[in-house]
């Protein structure tokens, strides 16, 4: 047995991943054998394939020469098809579709965001060798969701890694809905992709008023991913402080801490799962609306 395939190797030369290559050549050997005996029909099949992609004639593999060395590599048409499928599966909301690492400002008036942008790029570069997650903490509109989406888009496009975006409030609502008998999805059907995706973005952690059920559900999600050694990227507006650490009148969400909202046990679990990135700066939404005035 060769070593197991890294997900990123689905996009590179099959020589880097002998098991995958064997699998693919075995699959493509079957239609080729059929072509050999099917006569006129085979010509038709090849013609259709050639119309599909002029570089690989529909096989998905193309030959690349480097001096006397010839290699077979994934054709760009397949790489692109896979990236598009992964992007669709990631469920990035329309509102954040424009978010990329390349259009995240971190210069001039936004230079306080430079370390966060650096950490995001380092994460993309080092994943999966270092698969520690990220906990992006900052005030409203500072760019936490933009950065998180930028990271998963880059991982999808450059490394072919499966990612999933979920707003924390949406996720809890979907799980709650699944208890309703008229809804077809079961709780496990909602949670399975959340448990199993290679990288999960959980946006706005703590944004739902904590109850016993909320705490149990967050614990289930985070503990399952922790036990399976999967990577989670989290954004939150709440200070990474223990429960009850901020004094003053209670009730105002801004006076609460992450410990108050998800419980101390889960806050401590997050410290094991994630590297903490503090983001400071102005609210980009306000900057934008001021510039339109
Ligand atoms: N550094 C940045 N460069 C360019 N655009 C940015 C940057 N930061 C934020 N934006 C834009 O500003 C808007 C708000 O950013 P975003 O939603 O990421 O903030 P947030 O910190 O997640 O806010 P919230 O706490 O409300 O969730 C988005 O449209 C985003 O694309
Ligand atoms: Mg956000
Ligand atoms: Zn092709």
Image: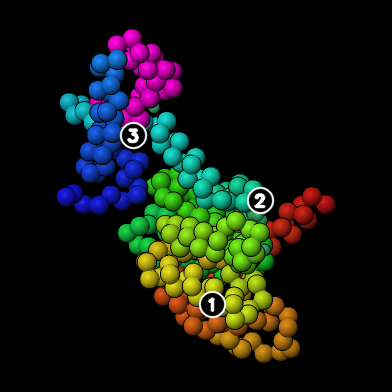
In front: label 2 or label 1:
1
Helix, strand or loop at label 2? It is helix
From the viewer's side, name the closer residue of 182 and 41: 182
Q: Quadrant of residue 261?
A: bottom right
The residue positioned 45% from the left and 36% from the top of the image is 81
Q: How busy is the neighbourhood of tag 1: few (under 14 within 10 Å), some, or many (20 plus)?
A: some
Looking at the picture, does residue 77 appear above or below residue 109?
A: above
User: Which residue has dot 3 on it?
Assistant: 74
Q: Residue 4's x, y, as percent?
A: 25, 52
Q: Are marks 3 and 1 in contact (CB under 8 Å)?
A: no
Instruction: Find the magenta span and give its range.
Output: 39-65
The residue positioned 30% from the left and 25% from the top of the image is 31
User: Which residue has dot 2 on it?
Assistant: 95
Q: Is mark 2 within 8 Å of ligand 1?
A: yes
User: Which residue has dot 1 on it?
Assistant: 216
In front: label 3 or label 1:
1
* Most distant residue in the front direction: 181
Q: Quadrant of residue 9?
A: top left
Marked residue nearer the N-terminal end (3 or 1): 3
Mark number, residue 124: none
Tell me: 77 left or right of 148: left
From the viewer's side, name the closer residue of 53 and 38: 38
Q: How busy is the neighbourhood of tag 2: few (under 14 within 10 Å), some, or many (20 plus)?
A: few
Marked residue nearer the N-terminal end (3 or 2): 3
Q: Quadrant of residue 178?
A: bottom right
């Amino acid at each position: 047995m060769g070593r197991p395939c890294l997900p990123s190797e689905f996009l590179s030369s099959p020589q880097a991943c002998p098991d995958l290559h064997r699998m693919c050549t075995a699959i493509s050997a079957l239609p080729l054998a059929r072509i050999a005996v099917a006569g006129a029909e085979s010509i038709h099949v090849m013609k259709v394939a050639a119309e599909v992609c002029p570089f690989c004639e529909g096989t998905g593999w193309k030959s690349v020469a480097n001096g006397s060395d010839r290699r077979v590599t994934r054709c760009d048409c397949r790489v692109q098809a896979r990236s598009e499928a992964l992007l669709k599966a990631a469920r990035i909301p329309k509102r954040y579709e424009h978010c990329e690492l390349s259009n995240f400002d971190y210069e001039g008036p936004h230079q306080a965001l430079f370390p966060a942008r650096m950490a995001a790029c380092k994460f993309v570069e080092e994943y999966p060798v270092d698969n520690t997650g990220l906990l992006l903490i900052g005030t409203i509109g500072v760019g936490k969701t933009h950065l998180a989406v930028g990271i998963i888009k880059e991982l999808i496009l450059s490394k072919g890694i499966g990612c999933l975006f979920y707003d924390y409030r949406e996720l809890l609502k979907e799980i709650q809905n699944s208890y309703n008998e008229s809804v077809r999805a079961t709780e496990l059907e909602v949670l399975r992709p959340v448990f199993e995706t290679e990288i999960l973005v959980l946006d706005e952690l703590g944004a739902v008023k904590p109850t016993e059920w909320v705490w149990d559900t967050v614990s289930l999600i985070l503990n399952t991913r922790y036990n399976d050694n999967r990577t989670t990227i989290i954004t939150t507006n709440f200070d990474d402080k223990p429960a009850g650490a901020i004094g003053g009148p209670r009730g105002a969400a801004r006076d609460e801490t992450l410990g108050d909202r998800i419980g101390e046990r889960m806050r401590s679990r997050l410290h094991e799962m994630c590297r903490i990135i503090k983001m400071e700066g102005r609210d980009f939404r306000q900057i934008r609306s001021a510039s339109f005035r």
